[in-house]
Image: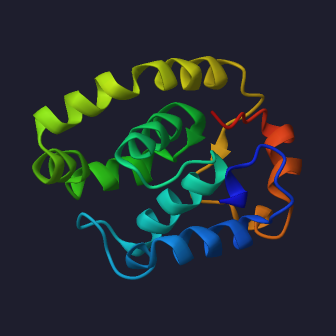
Amino acid sequence: MNYREQDSAQTLREGLDEYHGANPGFQFGDFLGMPRDVVQAHDVCHIVFGCGSTAGDELIVETWTALGTHIPAQKYAQMLSEGLGGEIVRTFGIYRMLRRLVLTGPRLLKVLWAVARLRKRWPHFEYEAYWDRPLGTWRKEFGITVV
């Protein structure tokens, strides 16, 4: 996947098209009971932070999202009230989530280090200004490191 390269010349739009091309089931409809805008913002984070769609990558992108993005408090509260956390646990199970955490541990440490070096947080729901700019350009602007 070209969007996973640190200095990718792809735009955010092109990266998302590539991601959806490799994962066509993610492109339409709700996921885990979340509205389309929440799902789209999550998919965009896969591109922003250079993550694939494996179980390990999901944990990485969720860590990036929690620590390296700006989610307005009202939107975050809405997502929680719609049952995001409980739905994730019901879907994946505690054992599977803990196993994923252990197996992804070293990479998570790299993400924590990268988050600490961010210049600014990614705007989780207001990313339209970045649609047609090369990924590598604004990753430098934000200080985002693909791990």
Applied colour scheme: rainbow
- Residue 46, position in %: x, y? 55, 53
Q: Is residue 102 above or below residue 74?
A: above
Q: In which quadrant is the C terminus drawn?
A: top right
Q: In which quadrant is the N terminus drawn?
A: bottom right
Q: Is residue 137 above or below residue 2?
A: above
Give the farthest residue toward the bottom: 28
- Report the side of 14 relative to 74 (left or right): right
- Residue 61, position in %: x, y? 48, 43
The residue lying at 72 percent from left, 59 percent from top is: 2
- Residue 79, position in %: x, y? 32, 54
The residue lying at 45 percent from left, 44 percent from top is: 57
Camera-nearest residue between 16 and 22: 22
The residue lying at 79 percent from left, 64 percent from top is: 129
Camera-nearest residue between 66 and 56: 56
- Report the side of 81 relative to 143 (left or right): left
Q: Is residue 117 above or below residue 123?
A: above
The residue lying at 58 percent from left, 21 percent from top is: 110
Camera-nearest residue between 104 and 38: 104
- Residue 73, position in %: x, y? 45, 44
Q: Is residue 128 above or below residue 118?
A: below
Number of callouts in the render? 0
